[in-house]
Amino acid sequence: MVSNLKTGSFVDEISAIPGGEGVHNCIQCGTCTASCPNADKMDHTPSELIAMARAGMKNEVLSSNAMWYCLSCYLCTVRCPRGIKQTDLMHALECLAVREGVSHGRTLTPAMYRSFNDFVYSLGTLPEMGFMTWFYMLTNPLRAIRMLPVAIQLLRHGRLHVKARRLTQKGTEQLRAILDKAESLGGAS
Amino acid sequence: MKQYAYFPGCSASEGGARAYGHSALAVSRVLNVELVEIEDWNCCGSTPYSSFEELASFCLSARNLALAEQKGLDIVTPCSSCYVILSRTNAYLKQYPHLKAQVDESLAAGGLEYHGTVRARHLLDVFVNDIGYDAIGAAVKRSLEGLKVAPYYGCQLVRPKFGFDHPENPRSMDMLITCLGGEPIDFPMKARCCGGSLIIPEEDLALELIGKILKSAQGGGAECLITPCPLCQTNLDAYQSQVNKKLHTSFNFPILFFTQLMGLAFGLSEEELGLRSCIVPAEKALAKYL
């Protein structure tokens, strides 16, 4: 694969995001990779991803499935001997991939996150049933069939609700004003 | 009576873990803890928002913290994910002045400001540290003597290090079980990941992780498991039948919220604790104490 995105300041872009600055401190000891419950499922291990980022391999890093397999379990973060916030670094890479519009055909995690965020942005709260239905509709409705037994059990035990909690009109408008302003400021870097 | 600004989070308020919210409130009443729900709180954004729009994700939390600050109270949540997101926002606003400036500007667009005076707490932390094991033990009406319980901490209660307990070998729920009269069963996976929200987009991967936790927890002879997190409970409980199907296992292991176990020992009713919301029936394991 050949990098076709701008690579000059990739490390700077990462380190400008809060939590991303640790990219400079890595000594490639591999503790994060050894601690990660999903490292074996990733295109590139967490430590490999940092090495690639520092080599300017922007396209390869941002199109990797690695950060989308991050569980946010923070085991790498508490073990890193260099104090790198590895989990937050993964989030920073996800945010950059989204900003660059890099697509991820091999994992549905970005699509799930997007559905989640759309609901939170428009309602200020997460209606679990609506969100799950929307996600399966957007991705592969056939997969929902496999999960139907779980949904039926949840319904039978009173754990899936069609009606969701709503903020007041005033609260919704206030939240929307805050989030719109944040978007106009263009990200935290 | 101790007062806190209560942030139930989407799941424990009117979502799939409402039994957690109900039992948390019921147990708090017994312990004289007043949880004043924040009006019009919004979703913390959890991992999905932090992974898409970092600034907006901090603003989601900052609004909730600002609303708690108006009450002059620390914010308490029963959800491990909300806990990590709120704590992380507090830490980052202190650590990164340029982020704080942007968050302040965004909050101002909604007529709010946040000065960073609110501490984010998990409900378990409040119970064991503010109220204390002695007071909890004194409220026990029905000792859980003989009940073997696996304390499953998961990840975000104890990691990263915003927590009140050890990030890899936590003990607070072990001690809680002991003071309720029960027997804590230690197990190697007690602070490992259940797969989190990846159960939705990558269920095969998450089911394997859930299977490992269940095997480890039941291996020590526990009769039920307690958790301080809505997502961990849902994964271990609601997806247990899927784990059995995929891994050819036969788990039938009751998964409770830690507040349900506390309420049981405090003599609260099955209805108050919402035990029927457990997908894997808990009644048999708990029959002696109901």
Image (cartoon, grey):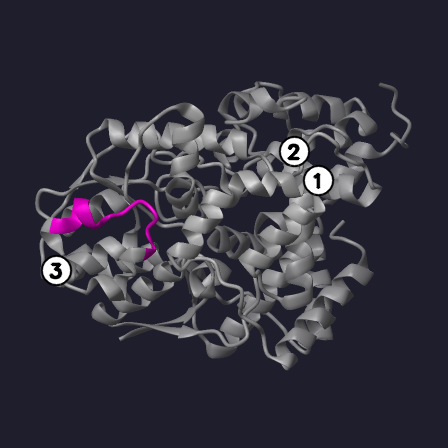
Q: Is residue A122 above or below residue A24?
A: below
For the residues labelled 2 and 3, the Cα–Cα distance comes to: 45 Å
Question: Is the C-beta separation of discs 2 and 3 under 8 Å?
Answer: no
Chain at tag 1: A
From the image, tell me which residue sits under label 3. Answer: B140
Q: Amino acid at mark 1?
A: Glu
Q: Nearer the viewer, residue B5 or A129?
A: A129
Residue beneath the point at 77% across and 32% down: A62
Q: Quadrant of residue B59?
A: bottom right
- The disc at residue A67 is 2
**Residue numbers of the magenta segment:** B277-287
For the residues labelled 3 and 1, the Cα–Cα distance comes to: 47 Å
| Mark 2 crowd level (few <14, some 14–19, many ≥20, 10 Å Cα) | many
Q: Please state the horizontal and vertical placement of residue B51, each as a whole percent of the image.
A: 66, 45
Residue beneath the point at 52% across and 78% down: B70
Residue beneath the point at 69% across and 42% down: A139
Q: Nearer the viewer, residue B286 or A3?
A: B286
| Mark 3 crowd level (few <14, some 14–19, many ≥20, 10 Å Cα) | some
Chain at tag 2: A
- At numbered mark 2, what does the secondary structure look like: helix, strand or loop? helix
Chain at tag 3: B
Say whether residue A85 is visible: no
Q: Is residue B204 above or below residue B65?
A: above
For the residues labelled 2 and 1, the Cα–Cα distance comes to: 6 Å
Say whether residue A16 is visible: yes
- The disc at residue A94 is 1
